[in-house]
Amino acid sequence: MYRIIAGDYERVGAASSELKGMLKRAGAEPTAVRRAMIAAYEAEANVAIHSHGGEMRVTLDEGVLDVEVVDAGPGIPDIEAAMREGYSTAPAAARELGFGAGMGLPNIKRNSDRFELESAPGSGTRLSFRIYLAPQAAGCRAPVWLRVAASRCTGCLRCLRACPTEALRVRGGRPQVLEHLCFGCGACLAACPAGALTLEGVEETLDRVAGTTLIVPAALLSQFGARFGPGRVLATLAALGVAEVWVQEHWEQALREAVAAVAREEGRPWPVLSPVCPAVVSLVEMRFPSLIRHLAPFASPVEAAVSEAAGRDAAVAVGCPAQCSVLAASRGRLRGIVASSLLVQAVRRQAAEGGRGDASPRVPRPEAVGERGEDVLRVTGARRVIAALEEAENGLLADVPVLELLACEEGCFGSPLLRGEPAVARWRWAGASGAARPAARAIRRERAFAARRGLRLDEDMARAIAKLAEMDRLLRELPGRDCGLCGAPTCRALAEDIVLGRADAAACLQRRLDKEDKR
Amino acid sequence: MCVTLDCLAKALGARILTADGSGPRAIERVYAGDRMSDLLNHTSPTALIVTNLATAQLVRAVALLDGSAVCLLNAIVPGPELLRAAANSGTVLMVSPFDMFETCGRLYDCLRRERSASPS
C-alpha cells in the first residue's frame, strides 16, 4: 500500500516506481510492465491533482496485477464526461506541469485489461484496474470480461437465471461474478435489461477502427433483415471508415479441416473436441478436465485471424467475453477490440441516414467441408453443450469423430451482443461477395489446455467431501423453490455459498418468514 | 534503422547535460509533445522525447517507462531538481537551442538521412 499526497506533484510517480520494482522482481513481461506503469502513473497523478489525498493498493497474484486507487474525495460529479478524452478539471498549476490534458482516465483504461471507476460527489473515488502480466495469466484465470455498473442494477435477477453455470450472484445491490465458475459465454450480458453488465476492455467509440482491417463474425453481416443484406452492411462499414473486412468464417472453415485431420489420426480418442468456441474451451478446462485431452490443439478462429493480420492495422469485433479473453495476449498488436453491438448501432444509424450500396443477392457458398457431414456432431446453446460434454465424459460419444460445440444458440449467430434472431441470421448469411478472402490457416496453440479450479469445493479431497456433506444437510433445510431472492440462482447454489463462506445462512428469505410464522 | 544520440545532438547543436553512462544510445524515433499523457504513451528505450516540460516529474515518468533520452527546448536552463532526477535515473538530458518546430525539423532530417544511408 502506498500513500499519495494531495497537491504534491513533486512525488507523483513514487508509488509507480515502487510498483515497477515489484513487477520486475516478479518476472513480469516488459510490455505488461509498461502498461502497468502508464496506468499507475496516471492514477497517481489523478489523486495528487484532484483529490484530498489517497492511497494505492496493489495485489499481485498468479501473474495477475490488481491495483486499487482510493481517495477521500471530493469525487467525480460526471464520470461520463471525465472518461472523454480532452475533458479536464485540473488546476492551472497542474496544467503547467503537463498534467491535466484530460487523457488520464482514458489512458488508464486503454492500458489495462479491466477497469472500474466508482465515484460520487462528496464521498470519494475508487478506481481499480487489472493487468495480466503474462499472456497465459489471462487464460489461467476465469475469462471475466464483464464490467459491472452497480448503480444501474435494478435487482431483477435475470442475469442470475440466464447463467448456465450458476456463476452469478446478486448481493448488496449489484451483480457479482464468481470468477472460477464463469466461462465467458456472456448470457448474462444479453439478459440484463438495465445495462448494468457490459463487456470489459473494449473501445467506447469506433474512432480507432477507422482505416483498419476489421475482423468480424459473419453474424454481424446478416443482422439487418432481408433488405439490408451482407453486401450492404459491408458497404456501410466501408462508409464508416473500415479499410477492409475479414470474416471469421474463413478461419472457422480452416479450423474445421484441421480438426477433421486430427480426428483421422491413428490412436486419437474420439470424440475430438473442436476448439472453435473459446467459451466452450474454457468450460472444458473448468468443468470437464477429463476431456482436455480430447481438445484439438488449435487456437480459436479469431486468434488465427489476428495472427494472419500480423503487420496490418487490425481491429476485431468480438461477440462475447470469451473472445475478449483469448485476445488478451494479442491486445498489444491490435488497434482495438470493439463489441459487435457497437458496430450494429453504427450500421443502423448509417442505414437510417439513407445507407449506401446495393441490396445484395443471396450468393451461394461453396460446399462447406464437414459442416453438414456425418463426421461432425454440432451442438449449440450452453445448456445443451453441457449435456453433450457430460455424455462425452461418460464415454457415450466414442463413435463421434468430431464434436463441434458452440456456447451460443446457432453458434456466433446467437452472440449475446447481437439482437437478431439467431436462426434467421444464420439462414440469411450466405457469404458476402464484397468481403476480402484472405488465406486462412488454422494455427496451433502456444499454451497447453489446463484444468481450472472449477467446481471443486476444496483443494483437499477429504475436506471437499466434508463440505459436500454439509451442503447436503443445508439443502434439506432450504425450501427448494429456487426463488433467487437470496441472490443465488438456486437453493443448491446458496447452500454452496454458505459452506464456502460466501453467504450467510440467514440469507434465505423464505426460511426467515417460516420462522416468524411459527412464533 | 537508427541513429546514435550523439549524432542527433550534433544536428541540433544541442548540449548534453547528463553523462551517458551506458555507451552510445540508439534512437529509432522522436516524439515531441507537452502533455504528460501523450509522452507516457510514446516513451520507449529507443525514443527521444522532445518537450517543453522542463520538470523533474517528466524525467521520472520517462525513466518509469524505460525511456533513455529527453531533449528540452529553447536553450532552457534546467533546475537542480531536474538535473538530479536525470542523473539518478540515468536519463540522457540535452537542451536544444531551438523551439519545438525547428528542433523536430532538424531531427527529422537527420533521422531520414541516416536511414537512407544505412541499408537495413
Image (cartoon, coloured by chain):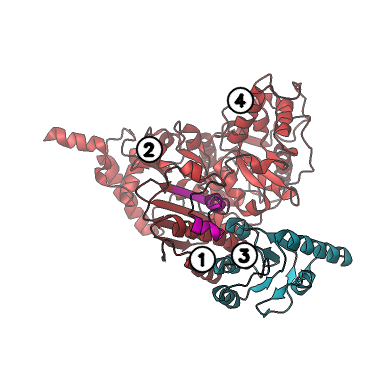
Chain colours: A red, B cyan
Q: Give the labeled residue for mark 2.
A: A489
Say which residue appears at 52% left-offset and 34% top-offset: A384
Residue B114 rendering spot, x and y as whole percentages: 84, 66
* Closer mark to the observer between disc 3 and disc 1: 1
For the residues bearing labels 4 and 2, Cβ distance under 8 angstroms: no
Q: Earlier in the sequence, mark 2 or mark 1?
A: 1
Instruction: Specify whether residue A495 is in view.
Output: yes
Q: Earlier in the sequence, mark 3 or mark 2?
A: 3
Residue A276 in the magenta stretch? The answer is no
Question: Which region is colored magenta?
Answer: A92-117
- Report the residue that reaches farthest toward the left: A519
- Chain letter for mark 3: A
**A110 within the magenta span:** yes
Q: Residues within 10 Å of mark 2 (few under 14, many from 20)?
A: many
Q: Quadrant of the C terminus of chain A?
A: top left
Amino acid type, mark 2: Pro
- Kindly report which numbered mark, 1 or 4, lies closer to the viewer in this rendering: 1
**Residue denoted by label 1:** A13
Q: Is the residue marked by circle 3 packed among few (<14), some (14-19), or many (20+) residues within 10 Å?
A: some
Identify which residue, A318 or A21, lies in the foreground: A21
Residue A57 image position (x, y, % from top left): 42, 61
Residue identifier under label 4: A423
User: Who comes first in sequence, dot 1 or dot 4?
Assistant: 1
Give the left or right position of residue A378, taking residue A147 as reference. right
The numbered mark 2 sits on a residue in which chain? Answer: A
Same chain under badges 1 and 4? The reply is yes
The chain containing the residue under callout 4 comes to A
